[in-house]
Image: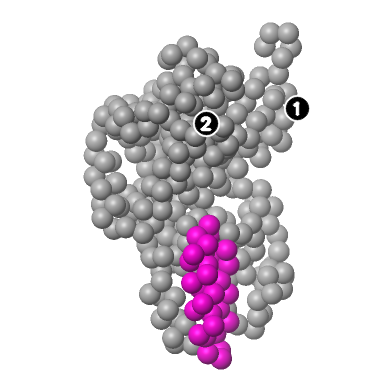
Amino acid sequence: MENNKKPKVVFTYVEAGLGHIMAITGLYETFLKKYGDKCDVVKSYIFSGSKRDAVVKMGKAQDNHVKKLAGSKLYNKFECFTYKLSSKFTLWTVDRVFRKGRKAIMEDFREMQPDLMVSSYYLPSHLIAEANKKGITNSLIATYLPDNYVYPAWDRNCDMFMVNSENAYNMAINKGFKKENVVKMPFLFRKEIQDFNLTKEQARKELSLDNGKFTVLCAMGAFGVKKAQKLIEKIIDEDLDINFVVICGKNQALLEQMNGLKATCKEKLNFVPVGFTNQMAGYIKASDLVLSKSSFNTIMEVKHIGTPMIAFSSAGGVEHENAKYFSKNKM
């Protein structure tokens, strides 16, 4: 770098589902530990942290997209259909949808001037690639795929495309990524998961759960357990003699609804609704069984901690492909 200036490395956080936040957090923590003294490392909420309304609205649209995937079978089917489209057509459509946001975020990039941008979500990588083409930035692009399926919206114009499974590696090569730019790497665990070392009894004590009861955790992603509502109501009605922890994530309305159901519980069931939490490792370890959707991040983290899991739902085509992958490999 000129004048011994430290290279500016920007890690982009996109609030469109917890999986991408988990993935970029693992990258950020690892990079900061190894290269934090050699680089100017920036943690950027690239959409919600913008001072430009059009950029904030673009981020909210991504947020709403994930919410629809979590709650609509029809929307899920539409998303699965889009996986059959070409990358060029998909990204062309994205550009048409986000015309104002794209124009506004170029000004953010002009001010930001990253030497390297790191993303675990398709849109920041695509947008910085566009800024490079326009001569606004001259940034290297490193993209981490947190899933097991390469859908068309991932921009091929990146300098490093990191994948964590053989399936994703082969798909990336077959779908037009330059072989020399695709890098196989181990699955990234957040520090919270990697460093977790409590026993089941210690975790239950820390979370104030009855240590004598079988414990079931229901966790369905950042926007809560809408798809599991019938199951939740059935377990409450059966009054099972268990700890039943339900993670409602960022869905405040769902948390209030679950708290309302808690008031209807009978004698034996210890029903524990939880909002957004940074103690997921503890809740996973404290449980005898996890009920969740087939998010690649969730499955891998639960397997790492060692709790049995039933994946009984998927949000979108990517998670459906994850479920097929784990089933095929008897995982």
Residue at the spot 44% in from the left edge and 37% down from the top edge = 58
- Residue 115's place in the image compared with 313, above or below, is above
Q: Is 70 or 181 nearer to us in this picture? A: 70
The answer to whether the residues at label 1 and label 2 have Cβ atoms under 8 Å apart is no
Local secondary structure at mark 1:
loop
User: Which circle marks residue 287 in the picture?
Assistant: none
Image quarter where the C terminus lies is bottom left
- The residue lying furthest to the bottom in this view is 267
User: Is 264 a magenta residue?
Assistant: yes
Task: Locate residue 269, reporting x and y percent.
Answer: 54, 85
Image quarter where the N terminus lies is top right
Q: Which residues are magenta?
A: 246-275
At label 1, the amino acid type is Asp
Nearer to us: label 1 or label 2 = 2
User: Which circle marks residue 52 in the picture?
Assistant: 2
At label 2, the amino acid type is Arg
Task: Locate residue 16, reporting x and y percent.
Answer: 47, 46
